[in-house]
Image (spheres, grey):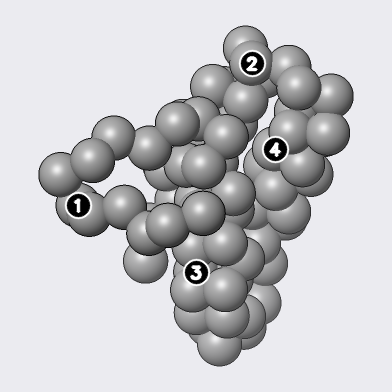
Amino acid sequence: MSERTPSQTLTLGEALPREMTRVRDVLMPQYLEIGPPGMFALALMRQSLDAAAKALAEGDVVAMLRAIEGLKGFTS
């Protein structure tokens, strides 16, 4: 699969794994560095990542839409 330019729209099947990667590889390490105050947010992130993975595995489009919106809510 070729890389898309920023002007090209991603499919849900492409966007959700990217968002999962952003949360897992970028945000979670930042919250780990915070220590105990970041643990609640980490628990929420893990829950959201689990739901996203389940939605992808089941091909549940509605759950995938909910999952991507939930993951987008996490910021640094």
Where is mark 2, residue-wise? 61
> Judging from the image, what secondary structure is the residue with disc 4 in?
helix
Q: Residue furthest bottom?
A: 33
Q: Please, what is the three-letter code of the amino acid marked with disc 4?
A: Ala
Q: Please, what is the three-letter code of the amino acid marked with disc 3?
A: Leu
Foreground disc of the pair 2, 4 = 2
Asked if the residues shown at circle 4 and circle 1 are in contact, with their CB atoms under 8 angstroms apart, the answer is no
> Judging from the image, what secondary structure is the residue with disc 3 in?
helix
Query: Earlier along the polypeptide chain: callout 1 or callout 2?
Result: 1
Where is mark 3, residue-wise? 27
Residue 13 in the image, given as x and y percentages of width and height: 57, 34
In the displayed structure, would residue 64 be above or below residue 27? above
Residue 6 is marked as 1
Asked if the residues shown at circle 3 and circle 2 are in contact, with their CB atoms under 8 angstroms apart, the answer is no
Where is mark 4, residue-wise? 52
Query: Earlier along the polypeptide chain: callout 4 or callout 3?
Result: 3
